[in-house]
Image (tube, rainbow, N blue to C red):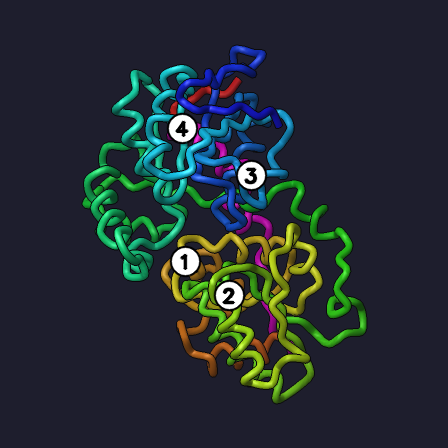
Amino acid sequence: MSNVTGAETTPVSADPPANSAPTIALFLSYLGGGGAERVILNLARGLRDRGTNVDIVLGKAWGPHLSKIPDDVRVVDLNAGRTVAMLPALVGYLDRERPAALLSAMHYANEVAIAAKYLSRSSTRILVSEHNTVSKSFGNLKGLKRFAIPFAVRYLYPLADEVVTVSKGAAQALARASGLDRVRVVYNPVITPQLRDRAAEAIDRAWFRPGEPPVFLGVGKLEAQKDFPNLIRAFAKVRQKQPCRLGILGWGPDRDALEALISQLHLENDAALLGYADNPYAYMARSKAFVLSSAWEGLPTVLIEALALDVPVVSTDCPSGPSEILDGGRYGTLVPVGDSDALAEAMTEVLEGGGKSAPPEWLDRFTNESAVAAYLQLMKVNAP
């Protein structure tokens, strides 16, 4: 990747594209370790493969996914430590670079992108994307965000050229919150040619070696949304019946509380918080089942990744995404949110051979190619 500092006083065109193809900008506050960030990286690769120039524009160039940016994708570091500093820096980028389109993801990048459009002299087409169900996420906001984000969604989002969500359920929730009647749905670009290659890579964890007890896997940030306490309690019930293990990949503020729960339930030998993994797919491919215990989602990419790797899936029927991904339970088991008994029963059924799988034609909607084509259409960009 090429790196360009984009502070307002520094030209961001120091390393310009060497061709006349249109440039598409993908904008985030930083490149964290979550699903939305993986989506942006997949889109960058897919747009690059279609012949466009791609800039990944970051409020601050840091995060665990930074090293995964392809070599021929330009990184523009706005070098803005705070949200308020991102706005003038992004205005400067749009004024100088004038990309054909800019897609932003998550708060406050979405709000900054819309404001920058109207403060700059650029004709760049602005698309903002929501990766969660706003009706659920609003209730968990704290401090200033509790008022600022709902206000911005209602009064700023209608000013974007396009507003995109990642599932039908998320679109319905956003339409109610914003008053918009033109919310688009584009499924996340999850399934890539690299997915199976990465799943085949070796991992140095004794639990996942042949001959060890079966492992249930959870993946996600250790926070309230993912409801890992429900998963741990469900696992405790399954563990009483037969040998098995639970591994949870991720980092976050609830780590201490989850470790305390594991200890309280005397699961120290069979349940573990495995930390952040650069390659979660290798763990998925070696697991007995993937379990999503979330209280809410937008479109959980980890469910799609597990299906693509032929790993049985058990999921809460949370708003929104799991039911759409699993076709109402046809391709995986859905259980009520917060019901550890139902979750344990579904996990036990998988141990007894009750796993389901999805056919390739169903998974086609979640490929990088499908998402890139949809975004190019919304961006009104003709790829070379």
Tell me the element at label 3. Answer: helix
Foreground pick, 328 / 265? 265
Q: Quadrant of residue 133?
A: bottom left
Q: Are marks 2 and 1 in contact (CB under 8 Å)?
A: yes
* Residue on which disc 2 sits: 292
Q: Position of residue 273 (x, y in %)?
A: 60, 68
Q: Residues within 10 Å of mark 3 (few under 14, many from 20)?
A: many
Q: Amino acid at mark 2?
A: Leu
Of badges 4 and 2, the one in the foreground is 4
Tell me the SS state at disc 4: strand
Tell me what residue is drawn at x 64 percent, y 79 percent: 268
Identify which amino acid the numbered label 3 is placed on: Asn
Q: Is residue 2 above or below residue 290?
A: above
Q: Is residue 31 above or below residue 291?
A: above
Query: Can residue 374 be seen by looking at this rendering?
Result: no
**Residue pointed to by mark 1:** 297
Q: Is residue 289 left or right of residue 16?
A: right
- Residue, disc 4: 102
Note whether residue 6 is visible: yes
Magenta region, residue range: 351-378
Name the spot of residue 275 as percent of width and height, x first.
61, 61
Residue at disc 1, secondary structure:
loop
Ranked by sequence position, the earlier of labels 3 and 4 is: 3
- Asked where in the image residue 359 lies, by quadrant, the reply is bottom right
